[in-house]
Image: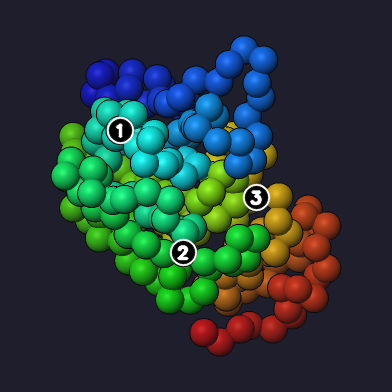
Amino acid sequence: MSGIQTQLLNEFDTVWVCPPSPSSQPTRGSGPLTSSLSVVEYSSSLRFVITESPTDSTLARYVQTLKKLRLTDVVRVCEAAYSPKLLLANGIDVHDLAFKDGQAPPPQVLTKWLELVKRRSAQASASNPATIAVHCVAGLGRAPLLVCYALIDNGMEPEEALAAVRAKRRGVLSSSKQVEALYDAFYRRTRAASPSFASRLGLPRVFFGAKKVEV
């Protein structure tokens, strides 16, 4: 990664697109005054941007910021609150993969998401990285969950993926259902039970099962 790209990544660890007033604090669904972007870098050629949902009135400022990050795609995992026309006009593809708040993504959503990540990753390089933004309503549940799935699919263990995302965006993934789903998907993929992870999370050992799971 070049010096310019490294500086850009550091600058955009967390970006206030619409800076809050000194007296306000970021809260879930608090509106455009707390619109922020959080960058999670997997490698020099693949990174993710987690954000809350913009609106038609804030989208222009989002696009200005996203273009600096060389964004390739925006994935919407909640009901759309804005027209995609401005993003498309700026060469940013928009994908609608909505699913219920507080829940794990259904198989068809997860499949499409991971296929997108793999496709973009295969096309990327250190000089031309794939940067994929994903947003839900507040950027605290569904959006970071999909990023965790992508990190796990690229080789991280669940606790590593959770730590990486939480280090960049505070307050994410408070739903036990979503966290459990991550571990469940991981152990289904590896076909191996590991009760040590369950004990660290305070989850029952039976959740992971004692036998291999056929997928």
Q: Determine the residue positioned at 29% across, 54% down.
A: 94
Q: Determine the residue positioned at 23% across, 43% down.
A: 86
Going from N to C along the chain, the mark reached first, 2 or 3, is 2
According to the picture, the residue beneath numbered tag 2 turns out to be 98
Distance from the alpha carbon under mark 1 to that under mark 3: 28 Å
75 left or right, relative to 183: left
Q: Is residue 45 above or below residue 84?
A: above
* Residue placed most toward the observer, 168 or 16: 16
Residue 38 locus on image (x, y percent): 47, 34
Q: Is residue 145 above or below residue 57?
A: below
According to the picture, the residue beneath numbered tag 3 turns out to be 173
Badge 3 amino acid: Leu
Going from N to C along the chain, the mark reached first, 2 or 1, is 1
Extreme-bottom residue of the structure = 214
Q: In which quarter of the image is the N terminus?
A: top left
Badge 1 amino acid: Ala
- Helix, strand or loop under label 2: loop
* Residue placed most toward the observer, 21 or 192: 21
User: Quarter-wise, where is residue 197 in the image?
Assistant: bottom right
Is residue 124 in sight in this rendering?
Answer: no
* Residue placed most toward the observer, 76 or 163: 76
Going from N to C along the chain, the mark reached first, 1 or 3, is 1
User: Quarter-wise, where is residue 49 in the image?
Assistant: top left
Q: Which numbered dot is residue 60?
A: 1
Badge 2 amino acid: Ala
